[in-house]
Amino acid sequence: MTEGSKRARAGTAAGPLSRRGFLTAGAAGVAGVSLSACSDGTGQDDVPATHSPIASPTGLEDADWADIRARFILEPGTAYMNNASLGMPPASVAAAVGAGYEALSREPLHGKHDLGEVIATRVVPGLAAFLGADPEEIVLTRNASEALHMGAVGVHLEPGDEVLITSQEHPAGRRPWEYRAARHGVKVNTVFIPSPFESEEQVTGLVESALTPATRAIAFCHVTRGGHLYPVRSLCALARERRIVSHVDGAQAVGMFPVDLHDLGCDTYCASLHKWMLGPMGTGFLYLRADARDRVRSAFAPEDTTDTPAYHPPGTSPLPTRAALAASLDFMEAVGIANVAARTRHLSDQLKSRLASLSGVTLLSGPTPATSCPGSTIFELEGVDAIAAVPLVEERAKIHIDEHQRDGHNAIRISTHVYNTTAEIDRVVETLQSLSA
């Protein structure tokens, strides 16, 4: 244990956190508290929580991920399979948030400075590196919804200009453009995308055919709420050829698989960090590509320029939660984002295999890795109302899932992250089978 970790443990578990304890120990270092490990309730994986350095898993099976699972503090016997709605932070992140608020409470002015230093020197540069972006292109926000609105409001549009969105956009991705239509005379067009769709080429072709000479921006998801994976790079290239702004909703992508923003070629990209990235609730970001600043301006500062874009929302920001993103980054980087993608794909494949053994199941997730994300699986179960199934599954088996009653579906959505197990998958499938019996 490092000296900083010892001081952090003394501050959170046995006594006060010193003024610079948070900054010295680092956001991940404050996790030295006595917490119960995540358990599936079978006694099979009740591994004591450990705060030793994380070793990247070397395989895809449950045993290879036992140490990672032990870093979470979910109530014993409960299975959480709704990560696409809200992620479950590991103990290190929860402890970092608490330590940040304690630092503010003990010495507000110094605590504010120290937390700000963590954000400026660790969080923003670390997040930019994780996403293949430059630090000055990252703006921290409360969530993807705020970022989506900031990006949409900032696009330079004249009355009569057109924006193209898809039929599968989350309300948070659609509403900002409806705002522009109501306030600024912009026309919003919607291109229908089938669910599931056949191929990347089908999506690109449908979007291209819906463009008009008046289209000035296109907005679409990287991964839809239902887990469909869009061909972002192709769509952004299509937009770039026509000098159309590309505005991407990445709320269901960041933290599930590698995302390289410069490689994708988008002008803006928005995401929450409290989903797959396992960050504290109320954290997200807006990415604005440096050479798109002339077409996407600040939503807040009338005196902004391309050299001083002033994208950041004004006022007091939630410093403890943003500083605790350092712990999320430490966790994800130690595990390895490629390992996360492989593990979540493995669990989803296990789920799909088990669902195939049930009668009355219609799998809606795309058939290939090119059209479906690793971690979310949607399906319909004959005779079962998806919305009614959510509380029933929790009541009967202490398992949290979600519904997907949209895009014409009466579907159930199960989203699995690295803390889930194949035993939990067996449990949820057996419970669903009992609902349809």
Image: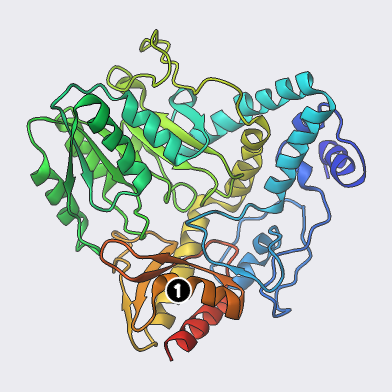
Q: Which residue is mark 1?
A: 388
Q: Is residue 61 left or right of residue 170?
A: right
What residue is drawn where x is 47% and y is 53%? 256
Quadrant assignment, res 155: top left
What residue is drawn where x is 78% and y is 42%? 30
Q: Is residue 78 left or right of residue 18?
A: left
Q: Is residue 47 left or right of residue 399?
A: right
Quadrant assignment, res 133: top left
Helix, strand or loop under label 1: helix
Vertical comparison of 84 with 221: above or below:
below
- Label 1 crowd (10 A; few <14 / some 14-19 / many >=20): few
- Residue 338 lies, in percent from the top left, at 48, 54
Q: Is residue 328 left or right of residue 237?
A: right
What residue is drawn where x is 35% and y is 65%? 405
Q: In the image as oriented, which residue stretches furthest toward the front?
A: 182
Q: Tell me the kind of residue under disc 1.
A: Ala
* Image quadrant containing the N terminus: top right
Vertical comparison of 157 with 162: above or below:
above
- Residue 364 lies, in percent from the top left, at 30, 70
Nearer to us in this view, 398 or 90: 398
Q: In the image as oriented, which residue stretches furthest toward the right?
A: 14
Vertical comparison of 200 with 247: above or below:
below
Q: In the image as oriented, which residue stretches furthest toward the top?
A: 303
* Image quadrant containing the C terminus: bottom left
What residue is drawn where x is 41% and y is 15%? 309
Nearer to us in this view, 167 or 280: 167
- Residue 432 lies, in percent from the top left, at 47, 82
- Residue 46 seen anywhere in this rendered image of the structure: yes
Vertical comparison of 159 with 381: above or below:
above
- Residue 25 seen anywhere in this rendered image of the structure: no
- Residue 248 lies, in percent from the top left, at 33, 40
